[in-house]
Amino acid sequence: MKISMIGAGYVGLTSGAVFATLGNTVWVVRRDREKIEKLKKGIIPIYEPGLSEIVKRNVKAGRLIPTTEYSQCVPFSDVVFIAVGTPEGREGADLSQVYAAAEEIARNLKKGYTVIVDKSTVPPGTAEEITEIINKHKRAGARFEVASSPEFLRQGNAVEDTTKPDRVVIGVNSSKAAKILVKLHKPLRCPVVVTKVRSAEIIKLAANAYLSLRIGFIDQIANLCEEMGADVQDIIRGIGLDRRIGTHYWWPGMGYGGYCFPKDVKALAALYKTSSQEDNLFSKLDELNEKRVERFALKISEKIGALKGKLIGVLGLSSRHGTDDIRGSVPLNFIRVLLRSGAKIKAYDPMAQENAKVIMGSHVEFLNTPYDVAKNVDALCVVTEWQEFRKLDLKKIKKLMKGNVLLDSKNIYTPEKVKKLGFTYLSTGRI
Ligand code: NAD
């Protein structure tokens, strides 16, 4: 098929490259000329394992065509995907990028039929809004339908998740659009869930809210473990073997973060408010999650005293291991809390350092290795699960530090081993 992918970020570029790998012709559109020129040479603007290779291969084969112009692709496409950003807005998601993309798509639609698919995460009812915008701006003779096919990839694992998805959700209002979209996704050989458009829109928000809820839930249990002298990792083993619960996806720590979970939980909470159900689970989940980083700053000051003037090392800056993305980064929120308490911060991240520098500037000293960070610090905080941090020479780290407090918010180390080395070990919900 011929496909336009509007938006060439984590979702658009990955999906575009995977659809191209499956043999489709895919134009990826973004407005930034410099980045498009780089993409034409196979240079990608983000770090995502394996993405660079498939982009290069498909650009070279002429199946993936980067462009800044809707007019060069939308009129020739069978399917147009919208994969632009939907950041947190004042009342739920900010849909301005979606509306702008819809208007430009409308102006460029061909005569005849096009399926327009919203891949961005949006509240229910957005497809109808997109339909209205397109009807207002389209030329005569252009026929179209707006469908929804939300994206479920995880940054850091995007290529694998897009190539081998657990499922594809397709929300449509006609069998014609359903047929086209089912055919497009068939080579992925995964379950395809065909629903009404509004159901598909809610499925995405519900999936992210549920995963956030698991994190919020185990964080609450971890708090209790800390008070009661229990180990949250034992609780996870004990509850996980119940098949209704499962051992997977338990991540106690500083709370959920990243580009999607916080904004999607907030979007659900906002939806409840507009439906006059003020009292809802999602507002509470969001409220508890926002407070989480402060608890960890407090844990450190309980061990080393007032943070003012103390030197603290932070290992990990990205919103998740495996990505250079810092949108919604919990480590950066944690650093902000430490800075507000008057601490001085040294930090390192294998991939997100340059992005973090842009945001944090001179407030943080960025160094080239974890060992440089450890030198002379009063406390060292390991706050993401990069493989590099799992393999640290903790004996060497201990020698380099001035203090002996090691915060392991992701529970990646074995408490007994760390304590044996002479560290005061702080974790999430462990004894
Ligand atoms: P992103 O910011 O990385 O990418 C958005 C892209 O859209 C950018 O390249 C931007 O330049 C481009 N863009 C914005 N307005 C445009 C316009 N009018 N015309 C052309 N291009 C335009 O965002 P992302 O992380 O890829 O997320 C996209 C959507 O997918 C969001 O709704 C997000 O919630 C959802 N999503 C994201 C993830 C994830 O892990 N990042 C996972 C699932 C779903």
Image (spheres, rainbow, N blue to C red):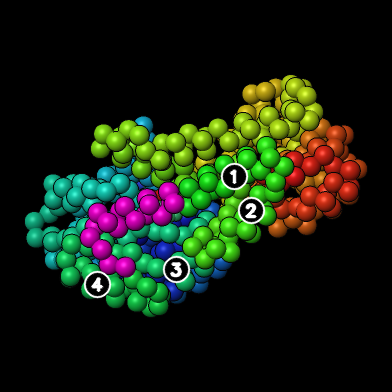
Q: Position of residue 174 (x, y in %)?
A: 16, 66
Q: Viewed as shown, does residue 19 lie left or right of 194?
A: right
Q: Is residue 282 visible?
A: yes
Looking at the rendered image, the disc whose residue lies closer to the viewer, 3 or 4, is 3
Give the quadrant of the N terminus: bottom left
Q: What amino acid is at disc 4? A: Ile
Q: Position of residue 389 (x, y in %)?
A: 74, 52
Answer whether labels 2 and 1 touch (C-beta < 8 Å).
yes
The circle drawn on residue 221 is 1
Dot 1: element: helix
Residue annotated with mark 3? 165
Classed neighbour count for the residue bearing mark 3: other residues with Cα under 10 Å, few (<14), some (14–19), many (≥20) = some
Q: What amino acid is at disc 1? A: Ile
Residue depicted at 73% across the width and 32% down the height = 300
Q: Earlier in the sequence, mark 3 or mark 1?
A: 3
Dot 4: element: helix
Q: CA distance from mark 2 to mark 4?
A: 46 Å
Dot 3: element: loop
Q: Position of residue 295 (x, y in %)?
A: 63, 33
Q: Quadrant of residue 247?
A: bottom right
Magenta stretch in the rendered image: 193-210
Q: What amino acid is at disc 2? A: Ile
Residue annotated with mark 4? 180
Q: Is residue 111 above or below residue 134?
A: below
Classed neighbour count for the residue bearing mark 1: other residues with Cα under 10 Å, few (<14), some (14–19), many (≥20) = many
Residue depicted at 22% across the width and 60% down the height = 196
The circle drawn on residue 235 is 2
